[in-house]
Amino acid sequence: NAGVTQTPKFQVLKTGQSMTLQCAQDMNHNSMYWYRQDPGMGLRLIYYSASEGTTDKGEVPNGYNVSRLNKREFSLRLESAAPSQTSVYFCASRAHPTNYGYTFGSGTRLTVV
Amino acid sequence: DQQVKQNSPSLSVQEGRISILNCDYTNSMFDYFLWYKKYPAEGPTFLISISSIKDKNEDGRFTVFLNKSAKHLSLHIVPSQPGDSAVYFCAASAADNNDMRFGAGTRLTVKP
């Protein structure tokens, strides 16, 4: 049971480059989330998808786009990377809106130089 | 605005003693609170939760206390074990709300 799988685990980008972070869950969960973790800031919600076919902005959406490709997959795209987007990115999922415990992936460490 | 605050970046305790991690929140709409545990190079894992209709929830060595009037919750670990050494995040959410807010985390070190 893989849970939530994120790829890649590490990435270095140059300013202005684009990339897509991939996330897939095999638990048949309805809702999926993208968070970023920065020192002293905790985890901040970038975008979420409450169910297949829907996406909504979170606390810090600027500079990002998302796609809920199907029930399993939720990708995060950086169109033009900036050094301020250097962070650790976590994807998470949960089964139902009333089930508050999230299952997180192991993270993608992104450095923008 | 940081709606969930963990004011202690770190805590060190002796094995076998109690660990108390604290969390404060500002949004009175929050009605569900969780604690997550995170080891290095791993994602956070759900530890324990409490809804606003309760003031205490226990799960083995872990107990969460909620004081709604003070907008404060705490996590007690008794007895603490070296394997408990990790970063602990407090999180809060309003009913049916996908925008869960996290604190900055407290790094707990349990010394043998």
Image (cartoon, coloured by chain):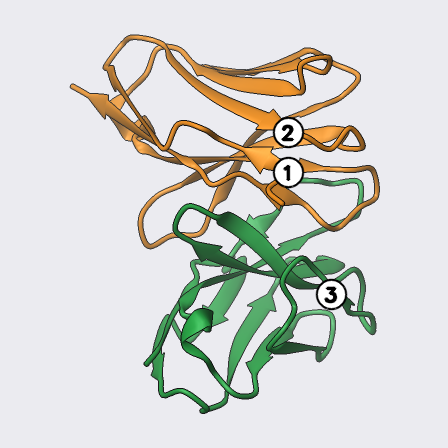
Number of labels in the image equals 3
Report which residue position mark 2 lands on: B25
Q: Nearer the viewer, residue A113 or A101?
A: A113
Mark 1 residue element: loop
Mark 3 residue element: strand
Is there a contact, CB below 8 Å, between mark 1 and mark 2? yes
* Residue at 54%, 25% in the rendered image: B23
The amino acid beneath tag 1 is Gln
Chain designation of label 2? B
| Same chain letter for marks 3 and 2 | no
Chain designation of label 3? A
Q: Could you say where residue B58 lies in the image, as x and y percent from the top left?
A: 58, 14
Report which residue position mark 3 lands on: A57
* Residue at 27%, 9% in the rendered image: B16
Look at the picture and state if A79 lies above or below B62: below
Q: CA distance from mark 1 to mark 2?
A: 5 Å
Earlier residue among tags 1 and 2: 1
Q: Nearer the viewer, mark 3 or mark 1?
A: 1
> Chain A colour?
green
The residue most toward the left is B112
For residue A21, side relative to residue B10 (left or right): right
The amino acid beneath tag 2 is Tyr
Residue B42 visible somewhere in the drawing: yes
Quarter containing the N terminus of chain B: top right
For residue A22, side relative to residue A60 (left or right): left
For residue B78, side relative to residue A77 (left or right): left
| Same chain letter for marks 1 and 2 | yes
Report which residue position mark 1 lands on: B3
Chain designation of label 1? B
Label of residue B24 in the image = none
Chain identifier matching the orange colour in the rendered picture = B
Q: Residues within 10 Å of mark 1 (few under 14, many from 20)?
A: some
